[in-house]
């Protein structure tokens, strides 16, 4: 067989999913290069996308049980409709849980109180009674509230359970550790135990950087709820998300070949040590694509040749089958002396996903401008970002970019016409949740 044809075939394979290694697995791995054809004869930069795709829960299958703790701010600023919304929203959201699930409720102000110790969700009356005892009080010992929730979750730690804290706060942490770095460190420690923290910020008085850092480092999620009357819907969404987890304790490890240097990871917290990159995921949601991009520096290759750039290995716990599993794929590239082939063979889906990551970076830049009081510069960045998203959509035909472009234009309009604080909260939520929640696939339930 012609060796050039073999090389081209190998390069093409890198951009599609390989066959599943086990029938009915909860998660599949796809790896691909944005440009599988690289220019020959010179050092170049390549972009490797690693994608983890959560499979849909089978219709007849029982979903994995959850172990969830609600940490509710009861400081003085929660008085009135906020605390009432927290009570009613928490009670309504309990309808998402089944008899095999565990729920606990912690309230915190300057002290921490366990309103409902870890209890089977079937004990609905007992749980509701505890929640109705929630009353607003003093300051905000947010760190201690999270720590107490973790201790309740540990009572029912199980490899086949999904453990999550849902943290609600409307104010600034002012008792105990209170910096984004301290809360982020706590989040990282909890992630190592298989516990993630979803944070819900109510109103405009909370510290969005702190809440986002805690969520990001624990692989949870962060949402901004502007009005107390919307709190119930958002709490319901958070419990819905917990019930959609199909894999946990995911460890992605990429080993780069000689002549390939990892430069940076886009869209995911990760560690680069020498030629090895590691990126953990606390969870994978059903019908969602979780992905990140690794930027690589590649030494020159000869024209019409193929080379292995890296090997990707993923280990995870399959919650649908209650067993450990793994996937592995090589990453191959083809080198060409014909420059036109580099772009003509590019993978449009991965190019679109790269642009989605650029969207997050642009939104972060606009956010920093807005925080510094330069709303005009923030608006310009967002408008330029929207135009670039639309241009990439035209060339890749990827409709996922359309909604992001619409949001960027809407955000630019809001920056020009509305007070800064709501915009800052919304932008921080958008930046953080892209890497944490993944991209929706058709049929996603939340």
Image (tube, rainbow, N blue to C red):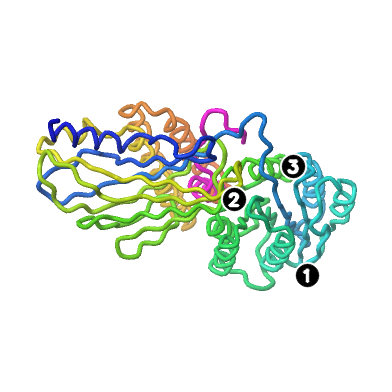
Residue behind mark 1: 111
Tell me which residue sits at (13%, 47%) in the image.
Answer: 301
Label of residue 13 in the image: none
Task: Please state the horizontal and vertical placement of residue 162, each as a whole percent of the image.
Answer: 65, 50
Q: Is residue 12 visible?
A: yes
Considering depth in this image, is 173 or 107 the residue closer to the camera?
107
The percent coordinates of residue 188 (x first, y second) are 55, 63
Report, in whole angstroms, how far the alpha carbon at label 2 lies from the one at label 1: 24 Å
Residue 420 can be seen, yes or no: no
Which residue is the site of mark 2? 222
- Magenta stretch? 426-446
Give the Cα separation between the discs numbered 3 and 2.
15 Å
Decide which of tag 3 and tag 1 comes sooner along the chain. 1
Q: What is the quadrant of residue 274 in the picture?
A: bottom left
Look at the picture and state if 111 lies above or below 251.
below
- Residue 393 locus on image (x, y percent): 36, 30
Name the residue located 85 percent from the left edge and 51 percent from the top edge: 127
Circle 2 crowding by C-alpha within 10 Å: few under 14, some 14–19, many from 20: many
Please give the residue where the numbered disc 3 appears in the rendered image. 232
Q: How many marks?
A: 3
Would you say 296 lies left or right of 123 here? left
- Residue depicted at 66% across the width and 34% down the height: 61
Asked if residue 427 lies in the magenta stretch, the reply is yes
Dot 3 or dot 2, earlier in sequence: 2
Q: Earlier in the sequence, mark 2 or mark 1?
A: 1
């Amino acid at each position: 067989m012609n060796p050039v044809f073999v090389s081209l075939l190998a390069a093409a394979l890198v951009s599609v999913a390989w066959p599943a290694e086990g029938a009915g697995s909860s998660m599949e791995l796809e790896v691909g290069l944005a440009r599988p054809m690289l220019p020959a004869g010179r050092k170049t930069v390549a972009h490797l996308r690693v994608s983890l795709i959560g499979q849909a829960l089978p219709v007849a299958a029982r979903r994995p049980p959850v172990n969830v703790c609600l940490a509710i701010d009861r400081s003085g600023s929660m008085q009135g409709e906020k605390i009432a919304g927290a009570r009613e929203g928490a009670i309504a959201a309990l309808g998402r849980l089944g008899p095999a699930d565990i729920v606990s409720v912690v309230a915190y102000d300057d002290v921490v109180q366990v309103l409902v110790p870890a209890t089977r969700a079937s004990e609905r009356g007992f749980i509701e009674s505890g929640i109705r005892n929630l009353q607003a009080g003093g300051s905000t010992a947010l760190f201690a509230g999270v720590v107490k929730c973790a201790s309740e979750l540990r009572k029912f730690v199980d490899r086949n359970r999904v453990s999550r804290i849902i943290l609600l706060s409307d104010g600034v942490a002012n008792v105990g550790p209170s910096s984004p770095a301290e809360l982020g460190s706590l989040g990282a420690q909890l992630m190592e135990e298989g516990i993630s923290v979803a944070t819900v910020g109510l109103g405009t008085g909370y510290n969005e950087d702190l809440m986002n850092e805690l969520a990001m480092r624990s692989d949870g999620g962060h949402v901004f709820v502007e009005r107390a009357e919307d709190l119930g819907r958002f709490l319901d969404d958070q419990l819905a998300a917990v019930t959609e987890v199909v894999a946990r304790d995911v460890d992605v490890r990429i080993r780069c070949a000689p002549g390939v240097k990892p430069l940076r990871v886009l869209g995911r917290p990760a560690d680069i040590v020498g030629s090895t990159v590691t990126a953990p995921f606390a969870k994978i949601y059903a019908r969602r694509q979780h992905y990140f991009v690794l930027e690589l520096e590649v030494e020159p290759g000869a024209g019409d040749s193929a080379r292995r750039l890296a090997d990707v290995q993923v280990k995870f716990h399959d919650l649908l089958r209650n067993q450990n599993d793994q996937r592995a794929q090589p990453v191959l590239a083809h080198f060409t002396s014909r420059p036109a082939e580099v772009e003509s063979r590019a993978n449009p889906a991965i190019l679109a996903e790269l642009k989605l990551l650029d969207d997050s970076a642009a939104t972060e830049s606009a956010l920093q401008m807005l925080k510094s009081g330069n709303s005009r510069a923030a608006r310009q960045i967002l408008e330029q970002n929207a135009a670039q998203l639309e241009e990439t959509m035209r060339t890749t035909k990827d409709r996922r970019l359309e909604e992001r472009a619409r949001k960027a234009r809407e955000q630019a309009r809001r920056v020009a016409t509305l007070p800064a604080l709501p915009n800052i909260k919304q932008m921080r939520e958008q930046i953080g949740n892209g890497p944490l929640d993944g991209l929706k696939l058709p049929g996603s339930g939340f």
